[in-house]
Image: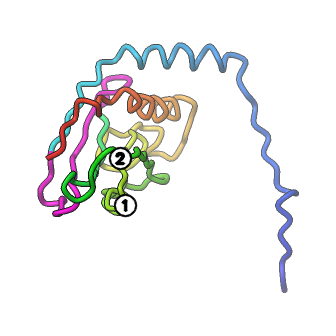
């Protein structure tokens, strides 16, 4: 038996809370007040002659330390400037080291927000698979912190 798919028949009914704008304005204001305390630790075991890899950490909302991988071409392999690329893992997956993208000329950052696996503190709601507005807020604010990462001060190895 052949099934015919009719995507137009599938709908989603999403209710936007009345306080949506106020909620995000207040939450992002709280995140903006968090000192990032970023760290970039060079990882020679994951680096190559063409690519430098860094283990990155920064502080986020509610005092959680967020981690990720940063990979960038070495200047002698490919001179800067490099366009930036940020990648997020799928649900319950670990971000991969973005060496493939760096080899193509990108300054690539693969972040592990708190709702992803092992490298950061888990939200208990995410562990149970019960995403709520609170757990999505944590993930979104972890990512929002990235916009203030001081890559301008970063010096390649």
Label 2's element?
A: loop
Mark 2 surroundings: few (<14), some (14-19) or many (≥20) residues within 10 A: some
Question: Residue 157: horizontal and vertical position, in percent?
Answer: 14, 47
Query: Quick one: which residue is furthest to the bottom in this view?
Result: 1
> Of 25 and 128, which appears nearest the observer?
25
Examine the structure image and report whether residue 127 is included in the region drawn in magenta: no
Residue displayed at 36% across by 22% down: 62
Quarter location, residue 83: top left
Question: Residue 136: horizontal and vertical position, in percent?
Answer: 52, 34
Question: Residue 128: horizontal and vertical position, in percent?
Answer: 47, 45
Task: Name the residue that disc number 2 marks.
Answer: 82
Mark 1 surroundings: few (<14), some (14-19) or many (≥20) residues within 10 A: few
Residue displayed at 13% across by 60% down: 45
Residue displayed at 71% across by 23% down: 17
Examine the structure image and report whether residue 63 is included in the region drawn in magenta: yes
Question: Residue 81: horizontal and vertical position, in percent?
Answer: 33, 44
Task: Name the residue that disc number 1 marks.
Answer: 104
> Of 122 and 20, which appears nearest the observer?
20
Region of the chain picked out in magenta, as a range: 42-64
Q: Quadrant of the N terminus?
A: bottom right
Q: Is residue 21 above or below residue 76?
A: above
State which tag comes first along the sequence, 1 or 2. 2
Residue displayed at 34% across by 48% down: 107
């Amino acid at each position: 038996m052949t099934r015919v798919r009719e995507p137009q028949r599938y709908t989603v009914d999403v209710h936007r809370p009345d306080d949506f704008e106020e909620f995000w304005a207040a939450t992002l204001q709280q995140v903006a007040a968090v000192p990032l305390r970023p760290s970039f630790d060079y990882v020679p075991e994951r680096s190559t002659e063409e690519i430098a890899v860094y283990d990155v950490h920064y502080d986020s909302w509610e005092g959680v330390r967020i981690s990720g991988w940063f990979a960038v071409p070495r200047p002698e392999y490919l001179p800067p400037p490099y366009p930036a690329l940020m990648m997020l893992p799928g649900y319950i997956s670990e971000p991969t080291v973005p060496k493939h993208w760096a080899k193509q000329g990108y300054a690539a950052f693969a972040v592990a927000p708190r709702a992803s696996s092992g490298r950061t503190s888990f939200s208990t709601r995410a562990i149970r698979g019960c995403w709520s507005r609170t757990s999505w807020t944590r993930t979104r604010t972890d990512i929002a912190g990235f916009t203030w990462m001081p890559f301008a001060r970063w010096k390649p190895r």
